[in-house]
């Protein structure tokens, strides 16, 4: 029912956007003058900015082809799917109140029971520079996560994030977060979230997040950024998915929104098990460091992340993991990547005839220590599991709305294989993106 009503609302909003561009006329109002903008979606606001709304969205269509470790039998498979198909509605009311509703028609966010919402939140900004936000949204953890999926350099964020998907994913929960700018060079946020996973009493799993950023240089093409993150959740007395697993940069092995590799897709499990019994684990903690530097068209960034899943039962051991990524990017046409305090943003082409061309390389590395594994299986040997991923790609920003991307991905593992015994695999991903 939610999907039916929301689809009707979305259709009405799109019709309004189209009609606004098709007709011109006189607009009257009982208050301040109204300003209408149609570049990059539809935006309507009063001249004093006390009220307004914007309708926009993003469409990301992907095609990938991969083999080796990425499939159970090692043979080549492919996937064609919508990575994201968002309708985004946001606005402001009475100057200090703001809202955002992002609905994913590709169904890669949310669920059928909770609605396919990437975000549905209300914020109060009357305590500027502080802001208080409530609703469904991703907890803050990490530099790449803070950067919009529209403008992250590679199609998929670093593989190490897969090990802490609970730390920076909303998982259909609700939360409250306070954030604030600290002068012109600092940013901090703190959030408390109730996830939809419950303990044996029906009490939701609680999670606490902290993020702090210091950026003494914070202009496009002149960035020096450092930050720290912390997240902790209580999983005592809860049945929990304790798998440490990763797609290793290849979303097509298992995704929604279209075709994937199906039963032959391999999403390696580096440690842990699914649906561990209540009382097996107690605390789940993650912390991370982030840093970035940019000068002109060149940027360098990286993050280090560590996670510790603490055992609560005498019969099991803690599971620990850590990992990092390092990424270098260079814009051949000379443009600098935009930066807003705490995150990178888009590249705006200087010439829409040729667009902006960017080359990048990213190296991901992770290790999982699970001493509960004492007997080898068909896909996991005893000992610490390791995975490394090389990403080499190019982005073409044809204009501010269209981005075409391609990346070659090479993964290698130790102590982990597919059913065929392969411990490496490679493939490529192509993406066409339109943002409005």
Image (spheres, grey):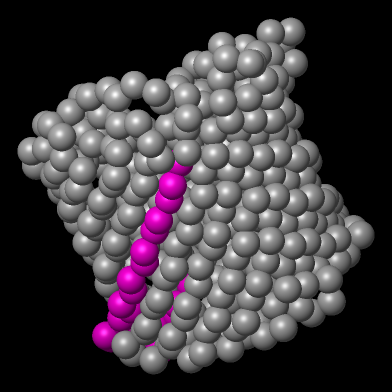
The C terminus lies in which quarter of the figure?
bottom left
- 77 sits left or right of 224 in the view: left
Q: Residue at x 79, y 79 (%)?
A: 184
Please tell me which residue lies in front, 243 or 367.
367
First to last magenta residue range: 346-368
Snapshot quadrant of residue 211 = bottom right
Q: Is residue 193 above or below residue 402?
A: above
> Would you say residue 349 sits in the magenta stretch?
yes
Q: Residue furthest right?
A: 127
Q: Can you see residue 184?
A: yes
Q: Residue at x 56, y 53 (%)?
A: 305
> Would you say residue 201 sits in the magenta stretch?
no
Query: What is the x, y in percent for residue 434?
Result: 36, 60
Query: What is the x, y in percent for residue 149?
Result: 47, 57
Please tell me which residue lies in front, 198 or 313.
313
Q: Is residue 424 above or below residue 401?
A: above
Q: Is residue 122 above or below residue 337?
A: above
Q: Residue furthest top?
A: 201
Snapshot quadrant of residue 312 = top right
Q: Can you see residue 10?
A: no
Please tell me which residue lies in front, 15 or 240.
240
Q: Residue at x 47, y 78 (%)?
A: 300
Count the labels in the image: 0
- 95 sits left or right of 158 in the view: right
Q: Is residue 375 above or below residue 380?
A: above
Snapshot quadrant of residue 191 = top right
- 103 sits left or right of 257 in the view: right
Please tell me which residue lies in front, 220 or 140.
140
Query: What is the x, y in percent for residue 3?
Result: 49, 26
Query: What is the x, y in percent for residue 232?
Result: 70, 39
């Amino acid at each position: 029912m939610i999907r039916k009503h929301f689809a009707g609302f979305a259709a009405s909003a799109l019709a309004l956007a189209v009609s606004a561009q098709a007709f011109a006329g006189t607009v009257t109002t009982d208050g301040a003058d109204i300003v209408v903008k149609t570049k990059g979606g539809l935006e309507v606001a009063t001249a004093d900015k006390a009220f307004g709304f914007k309708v926009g969205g993003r469409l990301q269509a992907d095609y990938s082809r991969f083999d080796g470790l990425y499939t159970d039998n090692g043979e080549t498979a492919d996937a064609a799917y919508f990575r994201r198909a968002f309708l985004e509605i946001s606005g402001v009311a009475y100057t200090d109140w703001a809202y955002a509703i992002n609905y994913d028609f590709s169904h890669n966010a949310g669920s059928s029971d909770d609605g396919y919402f990437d975000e549905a939140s209300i914020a109060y900004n009357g305590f500027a520079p502080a802001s208080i936000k409530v609703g469904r949204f991703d907890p803050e953890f990490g530099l790449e996560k803070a950067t919009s999926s529209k403008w992250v350099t590679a199609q998929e964020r670093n593989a190490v994030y897969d090990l802490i998907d609970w730390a920076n994913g909303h998982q259909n929960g609700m939360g409250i977060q306070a954030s604030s700018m600290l002068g012109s060079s600092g940013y901090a946020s703190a959030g408390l979230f109730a996830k939809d996973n419950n303990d044996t009493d029906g009490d939701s799993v609680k999670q606490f997040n902290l993020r702090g950023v210091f950026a003494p240089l914070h202009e496009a093409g002149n960035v020096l950024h450092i930050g720290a993150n912390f997240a902790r959740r209580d999983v005592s007395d809860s049945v929990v998915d304790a798998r440490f697993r990763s797609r290793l940069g290849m979303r097509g092995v298992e995704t929604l929104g279209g075709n994937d590799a199906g039963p032959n897709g391999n999403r390696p499990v580096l440690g842990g098990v699914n649906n561990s019994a209540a009382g097996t684990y107690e605390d789940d903690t993650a912390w991370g460091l982030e840093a970035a530097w940019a000068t002109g068209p060149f940027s360098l960034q990286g993050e280090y992340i560590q996670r510790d899943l603490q055992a609560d039962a005498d019969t099991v051991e803690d599971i620990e993991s850590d990992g990092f990524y390092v990424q270098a990017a260079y814009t051949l046409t000379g443009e600098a990547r935009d930066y807003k305090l705490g995150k990178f943003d888009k590249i705006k082409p200087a010439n829409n005839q040729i667009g902006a061309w960017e080359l990048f390389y990213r190296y991901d590395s992770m290790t999982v220590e699970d001493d509960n594994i004492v007997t080898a299986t068909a896909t996991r040997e005893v000992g610490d599991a390791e995975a490394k991923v090389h990403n080499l790609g190019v982005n073409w920003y044809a204009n501010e709305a269209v981005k075409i991307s391609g990346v070659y991905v090479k993964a290698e593992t130790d102590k982990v294989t597919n059913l065929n015994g392969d411990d490496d695999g490679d493939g490529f991903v192509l993406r066409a993106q339109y943002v409005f």
